[in-house]
C-alpha cells in the first residue's frame, strides 16, 4: 500500500526510473504519472505502490500512438515489453491480472480495452494449459530432458556441437509460439491451438527422425519403427507422421489435427523458409537440427518472437521456459498438478470447468470422470463428430420421404429449406474468414454446422408433427425465422465445441442478424434434440446461453420484445403457467408451450393458471392491487391490476384474460429464472422467512409488470438486488433483523454460478441520445433511478401505510435445486436433500445429518434408509426400524442385489448434479 508518509517525490522518482529502463516515450510517461496521481488521490491503493504503477504504465503504453517511418502512419502502443515491465515492478502475471481489473474499474476504461485484457488473460490461460500438455508429450517422444538450464555459447569460435534435448525443448516451444502468433485472432481457441501444438511436435520429430538422432528420440516411443535402433536401419524418403499416435497418447482428434497440420502449420512453415527465418531443406522442410543450422534457427525464432511480443503488447510465452517461471507467473506455491488461479478462471464464462447454471439442470447427464480443459474441449468435439458421422450437408432420405408423404414438393423444399440454408452457410463462412481460418477449415466447419442443422431440424419437425398432426408441414416451412434460429443454435454448438472464443456468444446473433428474443425460443427444443448425443459441457453451455438471453439480451432497447409489450401488457406470474401434468414432471419440461407454432406464430389463446404456488390463492384474486378495507375492490371476486403512471403511483385496471402466446412463453421462462435466482440469493443471504421472500417476489414482479422501463438496457440481477435491498430495509424491525447492506448483497451475488461483477459495477443511469449513455454502480442506480419508480410501492410493506399491498404467491418448485424448501435434491429416486444449515433442524420424523456435528450413526441411518425400498411398494412386507427422535420408520427388506442397485442409482443421481 502507498504509505501515508511516502512523498510524491519518491513515487515520481520510482516511476521515472522504470520508464527510463523501459525507454518509455515522454508522452506515455507523463500520462502514466497523471493517472497514477489521480487514482492515488481518490482511492486507497492496497499492496505495493509499484504494482499499481505497472498498471498505470501498461495502460499509458498500450493507449499511446507511436509514429512510424512511413509518412502518415502510426501504430497503437509504444513497443514496451509487458514481461519486462512486470519484472521491473516485481509483480507476477497473475497479480497483474488482478490489479489491472481493479485499475480499469477505477479509471473507467472503455469496454474495448477491457476486452483486450480479458483476451490477454484467456490467452495466458490457454498457453499455460498447453505448456502443461507440451512437456509430457515432449518427453514421450524425446529422451534426456533435465531441469538444468541451457548453456549459452561464450565465444563465437567455440566448436559447434549437436543440440541437446534441453535445447531442442526450448526451440520446439519457441517455434510453436512463433507459428501461433501467425493466428492472432484464434490464438485463444484451445482446441485449434492444441492441434497446432501436435503439428509442431510432429514437425520436430520428423527433423530428428530424418537426421537419425538416436540420442534424442525415446526408443520406447510408439511412433518409431521397430527396427529403429538397428545398425542396418534405412531411412525412408519421407518421415512417418505421428499425429494419430499423439492423439492416442493424449487428448486429441486425429482428423482435426491432421487438417491443422496440412492446411495451417505447413503453410506457415513454408513461409518461414521462404523468408529465411528457418534455415534447412526448404523443399522437404527438414535439416533444422543439423549442426550449423540449429543455433541460427534458434536465434532467428527468438528475434521474430521478440518483435511480435513488442508489437502486440502481450506477455512473452517463453516465460514458461525460464528458471524463475513460477515466480514470474505467480504459481510458486502451486503444485504441478494443481490448476493455477488464472486457469481456474478460464473458459467462455470464466471457468476451466464452467459453473453449472441454476436452471436447466434436468437436462444434464451424469458427470464423467474429472476432465482437463483440453480433454473437456476435445470430448465435446469428439461427441459432436460421432453424432454427425456419415451425415451429409443436405436433407436426409428419411426427411425427404416425410416431406413427400405430406405433399411438400421438391420445389418448395429447394426454395424454403435448401436455398436459405446455403445463404446462412455463406454468412458463417464469412465470419470464419475474419478469423483467418484456412479455406479447408472453413468448409469443414460449415459442413458440420449444416449437417447438425438438418439432423436437429428433422427431429423438431417430426416432434412437431407428432404433437400437432393437423398442422401442415407447409406452414412450418413458411417460418424462416424458426429455421434460422435452429441454424444459429447449431452454429453456437459447433463454435463452442471448437472453443472459438473470438466468436463466442452473442456473436452468433450478429452473424445472422438475429434478435435474442427470437433466438431463445429454440434453445430448449435444440437441447431436447441433442441431449442424449452431445457432451454435458455443450448442454451446460446452451443452458447458460438461455439464461444470458433472458436476463439481459432480450431487454436491449432495440429488442422486438418492446414491440410485443406495446400491444399487450406484461402478464403476472400466475397468468403464465399451465396446469402441471405427470408427463411434465416425468420429462422435466421447462416450457409446456413447446410447439414451434406456439413459439413463432403467436396465436391468441386463453391461458390456464398453473396451480404451483406455495400459498392458497383464490381463483381470480388480484395480487398486485391497492388494498383498502373500505373499498369494495378488496373482495375476492375483484380482478384488478395496478397500472403505473409517470410518477410511479398505481391505478387499477382490468387484467386482460387473453395474451400473446409468444409473451406467455417468454415470461414463463423469465419468471422461472427470476424466482430461482431470488431463492438462491436469499439462501446465501440467510433470508429464510417465507413471508419476506413473498414480499421480495411481489416487489420484483411489480417492477417487471408496471415499471418495465427499469429493465430496458439493464440486467435482471440489477433489479433483483435492488428489490432485495429495499424490502429488507422496509421490513427490518427490532424483533426481525433482516436488513442487508448492498455490500452484503453483492458479496453473496458474486458467489452465485455465472455471476459477473460487471453487473453491479456498470449499470445504466441515463440513456443519452447524443453522447454515450451515463453509467454508474448499483448504488448510484438505486438512488437515482430505482427509488424514483419504486418508493411508493415499497412503502406499502412497512405495515404503517394506508395502502398496504397483497402479496403475490411464491411459485413453487419446478425441479430446480433452488426451488426446494428442503434444499438441493441429490437423488431423483430418493427424497434426499442437502442444504446450508441456517437454523436448527426441526424435530420431525425425517432423518437429518449435520456435517461436523452429528454422530456417525445418524449418517449410517440415512444410508440404510435410502438403500431400501419403501415398504409395500414391491409387495414385500415391511419391517420396523428405530429412527431419530424415537420415531419408527417402516422400510422393506431388501437383498444384497437390491441394495447394490439402489446405491448405484443414488451415486449416478448425485453425479448428474
Image: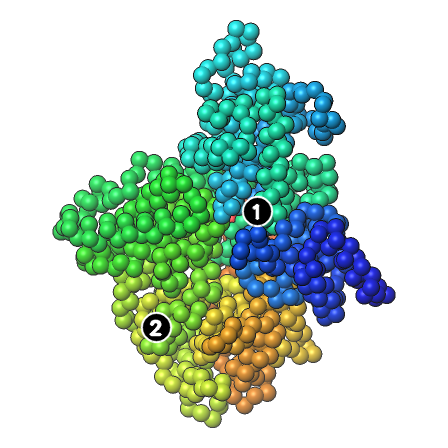
Q: How far from the left and from the top, in percent, is residue 563? A: 35, 73
Q: Is residue 600 left or right of residue 801?
A: left
- Of 765 and 14, which appears nearest the observer? 14
The answer to whether residue 843 is visible is: no
**In this picture, is 425 found above or below 722?**
above
Q: Residue at x 53, y 38 (%)?
A: 179
**In this picture, is 25 found above or below 303?**
below
Q: How far from the left and from the top, in percent, is residue 301? A: 59, 35
Q: Is residue 33 left or right of residue 347?
A: right
> Rounded to the nearest whole Å, what is the CA distance between mark 1 and mark 2?
42 Å
For label 1, count other residues whose C-alpha is less than 10 Å away and answer few (under 14), some (14-19) or many (20+). many
**In this picture, is 250 found above or below 111?**
above
Q: Which residue is mark 1?
A: 123
* Dot placed on the residue nearer the N-terminal end, 1 or 2: 1
Q: How far from the left and from the top, in percent, is residue 863? A: 58, 44
Secondary element at tag 1? helix
Q: Which residue is mark 2?
A: 564
Amino acid at each position: 500500500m502507498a504509505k501515508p508518509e511516502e512523498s510524491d517525490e519518491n513515487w515520481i522518482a520510482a516511476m521515472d526510473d522504470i520508464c527510463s529502463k523501459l525507454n518509455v516515450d515522454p508522452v506515455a510517461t507523463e500520462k502514466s504519472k497523471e493517472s497514477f496521481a489521480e487514482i492515488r488521490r481518490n482511492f486507497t491503493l492496497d499492496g505495493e505502490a509499484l504494482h499499481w504503477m505497472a498498471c498505470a504504465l501498461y495502460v499509458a503504453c498500450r493507449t499511446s500512438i507511436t509514429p512510424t517511418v512511413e509518412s502518415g502512419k502510426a501504430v497503437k502502443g509504444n513497443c514496451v515489453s509487458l514481461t519486462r515491465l512486470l519484472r521491473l515492478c516485481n509483480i507476477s502475471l497473475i497479480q497483474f491480472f488482478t490489479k489491472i481489473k481493479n485499475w480499469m474499474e477505477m479509471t473507467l476504461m472503455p469496454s474495448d480495452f477491457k476486452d483486450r485484457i480479458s483476451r490477454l488473460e484467456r490467452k495466458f490461460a490457454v498457453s499455460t494449459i498447453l505448456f502443461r500438455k507440451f512437456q509430457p508429450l515432449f518427453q514421450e517422444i524425446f529422451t534426456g530432458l533435465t531441469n538444468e538450464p541451457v548453456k549459452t555459447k561464450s565465444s563465437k569460435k567455440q566448436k559447434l556441437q549437436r543440440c541437446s534435448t534441453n535445447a531442442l525443448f526450448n526451440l520446439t516451444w519457441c517455434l510453436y509460439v512463433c507459428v501461433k502468433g501467425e493466428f492472432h485472432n484464434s490464438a485463444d481457441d484451445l482446441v485449434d491451438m492444441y492441434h497446432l501444438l501436435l503439428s509442431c511436435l510432429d514437425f520436430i520429430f520428423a527433423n530428428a527422425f530424418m537426421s537419425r538422432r538416436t540420442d534424442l528420440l525415446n526408443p520406447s516411443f510408439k511412433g518409431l519403427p521397430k527396427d529403429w535402433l538397428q545398425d542396418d536401419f534405412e531411412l525412408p524418403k519421407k518421415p512417418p507422421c505421428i499425429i494419430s499416435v499423439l492423439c492416442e497418447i493424449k487428448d486429441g482428434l486425429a482428423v482435426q489435427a491432421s487438417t491443422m497440420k496440412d492446411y495451417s502449420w505447413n503453410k506457415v512453415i513454408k513461409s518461414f523458409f521462404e523468408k529465411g527465418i528457418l534455415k534447412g531443406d526448404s523443399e522437404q522442410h527438414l535439416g533444422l537440427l543439423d549442426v550449423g543450422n540449429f543455433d541460427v534457427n534458434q536465434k532467428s525464432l527468438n528475434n521474430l518472437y521478440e518483435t511480435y511480443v513488442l508489437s502486440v503488447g502481450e506477455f512473452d510465452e517463453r516465460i514458461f521456459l525460464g528458471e524463475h517461471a513460477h515466480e514470474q507467473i505467480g504459481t510458486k506455491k502451486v503444485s504441478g498438478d494443481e490448476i493455477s488461479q488464472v486457469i481456474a478462471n478460464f473458459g467462455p464464462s470464466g471457468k476451466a470447468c464452467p459453473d453449472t447454471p441454476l436452471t436447466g439442470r434436468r437436462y444434464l447427464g451424469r458427470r464423467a470422470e474429472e476432465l482437463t480443459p483440453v480433454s473437456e474441449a476435445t470430448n465435446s468435439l469428439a461427441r459432436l463428430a460421432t453424432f454427425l458421422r456419415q451425415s451429409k450437408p443436405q436433407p436426409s432420405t428419411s426427411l425427404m420421404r416425410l416431406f413427400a408423404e405430406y405433399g411438400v414438393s421438391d420445389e418448395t423444399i429447394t426454395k424454403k429449406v435448401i436455398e436459405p440454408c446455403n445463404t446462412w452457410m455463406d454468412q458463417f463462412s464469412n465470419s470464419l474468414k475474419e478469423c483467418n481460418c484456412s479455406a479447408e477449415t472453413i468448409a469443414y466447419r460449415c459442413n458440420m454446422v449444416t449437417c447438425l442443422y438438418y439432423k436437429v431440424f428433422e427431429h423438431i419437425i417430426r416432434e412437431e408433427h407428432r404433437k400437432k398432426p393437423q398442422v401442415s408441414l407447409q406452414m412450418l416451412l413458411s417460418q424462416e425465422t424458426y429455421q434460422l434460429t435452429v441454424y444459429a443454435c447449431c452454429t453456437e454448438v459447433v463454435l463452442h465445441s471448437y472453443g472459438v472464443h473470438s466468436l463466442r456468444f452473442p456473436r452468433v446473433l450478429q452473424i445472422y442478424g438475429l434478435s435474442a428474443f427470437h433466438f431463445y425460443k429454440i434453445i430448449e427444443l435444440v437441447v431436447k434434440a441433442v441431449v442424449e448425443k452431445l457432451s454435458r459441457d455443450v448442454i451446460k453451455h446452451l443452458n447458460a446461453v438461455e439464461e444470458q438471453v433472458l436476463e439481459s439480451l432480450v431487454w436491449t432497447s432495440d429488442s422486438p420484445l418492446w414491440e410485443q409489450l406495446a400491444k399487450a401488457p406484461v402478464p403476472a406470474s400466475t397468468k403464465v403457467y399451465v396446469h402441471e401434468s405427470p408427463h411434465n414432471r416425468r420429462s422435466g419440461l421447462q416450457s409446456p408451450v413447446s410447439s414451434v407454432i406456439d413459439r413463432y406464430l403467436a396465436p391468441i389463446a386463453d391461458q390456464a393458471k398453473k396451480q404451483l404456488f406455495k400459498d392458497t390463492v383464490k381463483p381470480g384474486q388480484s395480487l398486485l392491487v391497492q388494498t383498502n378495507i373500505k373499498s369494495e375492490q378488496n373482495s375476492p371476486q375483484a380482478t384488478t391490476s395496478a397500472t403505473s403512471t409517470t410518477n410511479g403511483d398505481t391505478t387499477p385496471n382490468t387484467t386482460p384474460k387473453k395474451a400473446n402466446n409468444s409473451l406467455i412463453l417468454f415470461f414463463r421462462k423469465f419468471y422461472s429464472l427470476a424466482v430461482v435466482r431470488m431463492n438462491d440469493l436469499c439462501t446465501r443471504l440467510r433470508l429464510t422467512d417465507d413471508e419476506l421472500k413473498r414480499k421480495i417476489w411481489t416487489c420484483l414482479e411489480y417492477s417487471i409488470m408496471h415499471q418495465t422501463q427499469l429493465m430496458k438496457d439493464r440486467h435482471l440481477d440489477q433489479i433483483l438486488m435492488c428489490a432485495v435491498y429495499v424490502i429488507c430495509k422496509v421490513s427490518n424491525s427490532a424483533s426481525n433483523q433482516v436488513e442487508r447492506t448492498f455490500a452484503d448483497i453483492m458479496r453473496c451475488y458474486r458467489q452465485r454460478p455465472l455471476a459477473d461483477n460487471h453487473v453491479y459495477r456498470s449499470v445504466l443511469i441515463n440513456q443519452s441520445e447524443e453522447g454515450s449513455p451515463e453509467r454508474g454502480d448499483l448504488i448510484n442506480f438505486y438512488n437515482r433511478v430505482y427509488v424514483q419508480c419504486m418508493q411508493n410501492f415499497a412503502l406499502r410493506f412497512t405495515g404503517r401505510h394506508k395502502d398496504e399491498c397483497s402479496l403475490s404467491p411464491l411459485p413453487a418448485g419446478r425441479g430446480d435445486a433452488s426451488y426446494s424448501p428442503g434444499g438441493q435434491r441429490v437423488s431423483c429416486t430418493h427424497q434426499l436433500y442437502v442444504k446450508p444449515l441456517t437454523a436448527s433442524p426441526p424435530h420431525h420424523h425425517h432423518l437429518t445429518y449435520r456435517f461436523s456435528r452429528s454422530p456417525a450413526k445418524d449418517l449410517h441411518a440415512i444410508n440404510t434408509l435410502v438403500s431400501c425400498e419403501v415398504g409395500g411398494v414391491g409387495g414385500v412386507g415391511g419391517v420396523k426400524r428405530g429412527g431419530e427422535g424415537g420415531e419408527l420408520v417402516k422400510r422393506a427388506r431388501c437383498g444384497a442385489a437390491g441394495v447394490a442397485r439402489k446405491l448405484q442409482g443414488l451415486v449416478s443421481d448425485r453425479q448428474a448434479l
